[in-house]
Amino acid sequence: MTNAYTRRWFELFLRPLDPAQTAREADFLRRQLPRERFARVVDVCCGPGRHAHRLAEAGYAVTGVDRDGASIAEARARALPHEAYREHDMRDLPSLGLRADAVLCLWQSFGFFDAATNGRVLGDFAAMLPVGGRCVVDLYHHDFFAANHGTRTMELRGQRITESKQMVDGRLSVTLTEGGGEIIDAFEWQLYTPEEFTALADTAGLARLLTCTNYDERQEATSRLPRVQYVLERRG
């Protein structure tokens, strides 16, 4: 699966987000990546630069990477001088030659591929970092979606959208259709329990410093909630 996000997905799910949510997520990143130590940031699967731009406004030097050309063009249109964007596939990160103090991969943008490729991509994140560099990854919790799948219908921006989720062999498949049955998007990810992702990170040379949820260090990640944020550190 290549998980190509259509313009309809951006219109229905990303653009309506409250700016306060983006600010809260960026505040978490700034707490976990104090600029004095982590001034250079690479945001993998950055989309239109929702987080990257906030960090650039705070003085970070940010490079966003995404294979979606329209999103990259949108991000570039408002970029600050120390904010750059590259249209590129995350499976080929080494060819960019990027180095950073911190790497981000947010909003369930990891796990698109088979197990070997996912592991290699995480290793490529680590390879961009010095010893002590950090990686922040935001993922779905495997156990939440194992217990909460099926079909639901919702109204989004005046459109009736049906979302169908199915878990098979640790992979979550999601299909979005509009009222007439037309498929908008289809996605698939490998999902991980916190223990599984910690083990994968360890193989990539990344040690887990923190797991939490809702971009809040005080909230413990749990299978009762859908998302987990991981803060990882490059080992020596």
Image (spheres, grey):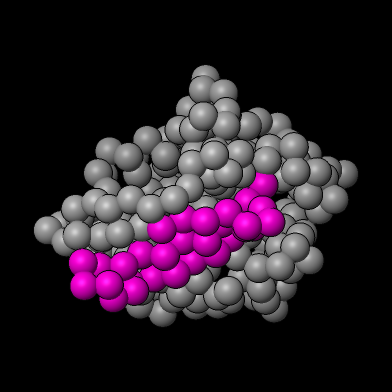
Q: Pick out the residue farthest to the right.
A: 236
Residue at (71% x, 67% y) in the render: 114
Q: Position of residue 205 (x, y in %)?
A: 83, 49
- Occupied quadrant, residue 53: bottom left
Which stretch is magenta? 164-192
Q: Is residue 234 left or right of residue 153?
A: right
Q: Position of residue 153 (x, y in %)?
A: 27, 53
Q: Is residue 73 visible?
A: no
Name the quadrant of the C terminus. Answer: top right
Q: Pick out the residue farthest to the top.
A: 218
From this view, report whether residue 78 is shown above or below residue 183: above
79 within the magenta span? no
Q: Main secondary structure of the magenta part?
A: strand
Q: Is residue 48 visible?
A: yes
Q: Position of residue 197 (x, y in %)?
A: 72, 45
Viewer-closest of 89 and 51: 89
